[in-house]
Image (tube, helix red, strand yellow):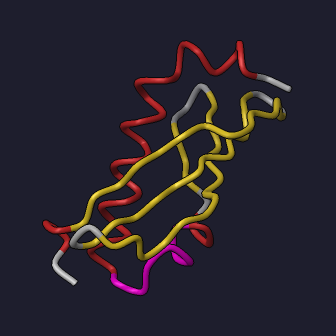
Amino acid sequence: MNQDDVKFRFEVLEVKEIDGGYRIKVDVKVRWLKEVVYHGPVHVDLNRIGIFPVPSDIASASPYKGVRGKLGAEIKQYIRIQRKFIPELVN
């Protein structure tokens, strides 16, 4: 699987407040050549230090190391853009 052919789509499903930050549940669709190869949740921890996707969730999305790395980077970028809206979404 060539990581250049992989596309991601993200949507915030749920936000919970935890000690010093937030636990965000993100719905992730991974597409390879217009075919959905993964659709499921990935949890992300957000605190004042940074944005940390849960490694086991990232690992379950793809068996390919390059795709996992790209997914981690893309989901961090998505959360960084959404950061100012996260407190409004707390359940």
Q: Residue 54 placed where, x, y %?
A: 61, 59
* Residue at 33% in and 80% down: 65
Quarter holding residue 88: top right
* Residue at 42% in and 42% down: 76
- Decide which of 55, 61 is in the foreground and name it: 61
Q: Residue 72 placed where, x, y %?
A: 41, 57
Magenta residue check for 63? yes
Looking at the rendering, the stretch of residues picked out in magenta corresponds to 58-64
Quarter holding residue 4: bottom left
Q: Residue 15 placed where, x, y %?
A: 74, 33
| Left/right of residue 21 with respect to residue 6 in the rendered view | right
| Left/right of residue 59 with respect to residue 3 in the rendered view | right
Q: Residue 62 placed where, x, y %?
A: 44, 79
| Left/right of residue 51 with respect to residue 30 in the rendered view | right
Quarter holding residue 46: top right
* Residue at 48% in and 72% down: 38
Query: How many labels, in total?
Result: 0
* Residue at 52% in and 21% down: 83
Classify 47 as above or below 6.
above
Quarter of the figure that contains the C terminus: top right
Magenta residue check for 53? no
